[in-house]
Amino acid sequence: MAAFGDWLQAQRRKIFTKSRQGEKLTYIHNHWDGLQTFLTDGRVEIDSNRVENLIRPIALNRKNALFAGHDEGGIAWGRIASLIETCKINGIEPFAYLKATLTALANGHPQSRLDDLLPWNFTPSR
């Protein structure tokens, strides 16, 4: 990667900054540290395909949120969609999670223990 970084720097010195290629090289330069993160942290994937595939349903449904009628409705839809996708990531059935969580809140679940209700802490009742 160091050799590649050196090569990129050499190219940046040769190419007009405002050209299309110059802009791409500037982008790489500005994000160089982040682009190398996957080399030192095994938890970081080399690409974002998994994340992009997870948010695709949200992006596809964005236009459907127009029926919300108000900005607050769109914000609420975004929160629910995020919870649903987080459930899926954690292998939890979204309806069961939402039902149990809303029931717990209605039954007075303590506000000091809201973290217990996050999707990754959810344990379905048998």
Image (spheres, rainbow, N blue to C red):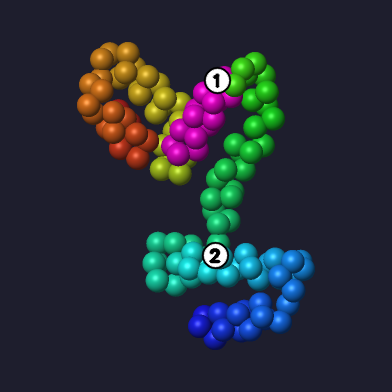
Q: Which image quadrant is residue 75 in?
A: top right
Q: Nearer the viewer, residue 57 or 4?
A: 4
The residue depicted at 54 percent of the width and 64 percent of the height is: 31
User: Does residue 45 belong to the magenta stretch?
Assistant: no
Going by the numbered disc 1, the residue's amino acid type is: Glu
Give the answer, above or below, for where 121 lies relative to 40. Answer: above
In the image, which residues are magenta? Answer: 73-87
Q: Secondary structure at mark 1?
A: helix
The residue depicted at 35 percent of the width and 40 percent of the height is: 120
User: Does residue 80 belong to the magenta stretch?
Assistant: yes
In the displayed structure image, the side of residue 29 where residue 123 appears, left or right: left
Q: Nearer the viewer, residue 104 or 41?
A: 41
The residue depicted at 23 percent of the width and 28 percent of the height is: 113
- Residue at mark 2: 31
Instruction: Calculate the distance from the C-alpha at mark 1 to the C-alpha at mark 2.
Output: 34 Å
Q: Is residue 13 visible?
A: yes
In the displayed structure image, the side of residue 94 where residue 47 appears, left or right: right
Q: Residues within 10 Å of mark 1 (few under 14, many from 20)?
A: few
